[in-house]
Image (cartoon, helix red, strand yellow):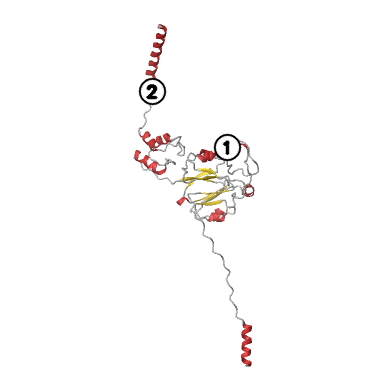
Amino acid sequence: MKLILIALLVLGITGLVAAVLLYLIAQQFKVEEDPRIDLVQEVLPGANCGGCGFAGCRALAEACVKADSLDGLMCPVGGAPVMEKVGEILGMAAVAAEPKVAVVRCNGVCDARPKTSTYDGVRTCQIMHNLYVGETACPFGCLGCGDCVAACQFGALSIDEKTGLPVVDEEKCTACGKCVKACPRNIIELRKKGPKGRRMVVECVNKDKGAVARKACLNACIGCGKCQKECAFDAITIENNLAYIDFNKCRLCRKCEAACPTGAIHAINFPPRPPKPATTTPSTPSTPNTTNNNQSEKKEEQA
């Protein structure tokens, strides 16, 4: 009995000494945190999506508190209203950032890009991409397994059953960038929404030469440069046989869309163009019947 009591006593004293030592060490090496970090974190949405460029909302809150201004710091989920609250807490002016949205840069629908094989492995884009070219002849286009859909925390992406391509719900998209990172083919891009949600996009990422790209997909960009010649604002560049529209320079004139011979350039959220007026051929003026007039004149003279 005495041995048990002695063991318990020794164990208790050892635990007490260890607790005191841990407390003293914690006090010695503790890091003082600005209390405003907790306040900023409370107003953030808590999605921890990484769209801000930081590991999570806590890391963004720390960056905001330590920064001299809120330039370049943005919560894509909360948007401008949340950043205004952060600015009020820190006594800084929140810089209004132009909203962005995810854009799928592939228009390889089933009719334009027929299947050449059938994949019966694990249905993920990453695994299919690592194994082979995919179920079609295009080595750049969407694989359609839905890795982007699974990565989206906000339900903004879905796979269209008819086209096999991802569709973005712009009302739900927060431009967090999760889908961009999840796509192994890099066909999803964050672009500015544009005025009234309107924007011009080259919906193709195929870098093969024109004939090869066209053989793989009828809607592919062939790098012909007609859109670039048509653009008066230098918004279009051709690199690696592929056209790209700079949304910072684009003025939404839509001339490039009309110039594209393959329909690779799409105007998003624009009203439909008015139908062209029907061309009518001008009617030929009727010529007077001189024969009948001459005959009637002769009859009058004979009378």
Looking at the image, is mark 1 or mark 2 earlier in the sequence? 2
**Furthest residue in direction top, as rendered:** 2
Within 10 angstroms of label 2, few (less than 14), some, or many (20 or more) residues?
Answer: few
**Furthest residue in direction bottom, as rendered:** 303
Image side of residue 133 versus residue 63, left or right: right
Q: Residue at x 36, y 41 (%)?
A: 85
Give the percent coordinates (x, y) of residue 198: 48, 51
Mark drawn on residue 37: none
Quadrant in the picture for residue 117: top right
Give the percent coordinates (x, y) of residue 251: 48, 53
Q: Between 59 and 124, which is closer to the camera in this rendering? A: 124
Q: Is residue 297 above or below residue 106?
A: below
Give the quadrant of the N terminus. Answer: top left
Regarding mark 2 in the picture, which secondary structure is present there? helix
Q: Amino acid at mark 2?
A: Ala
Image side of residue 140 versus residue 65, left or right: right
Give the percent coordinates (x, y) of residue 61: 40, 36
Regarding mark 1 in the picture, which secondary structure is present there? helix
* Between marks 1 and 2 in the image, the one whose residue lies nearer the viewer: 1
Give the percent coordinates (x, y) of residue 294: 63, 86
Q: Residue at x 53, y 43 (%)?
A: 158
Q: Amino acid at mark 1?
A: Gln
Q: Is residue 26 above or below residue 6?
A: below
* Number of marks present in the image shown: 2
Mark drawn on residue 26: 2
Mark drawn on residue 126: 1
Give the quadrant of the C terminus. Answer: bottom right
Q: Between 44 and 205, which is closer to the camera in this rendering? A: 44
Query: Badges 1 and 2: C-beta atoms under 8 Å apart?
Result: no
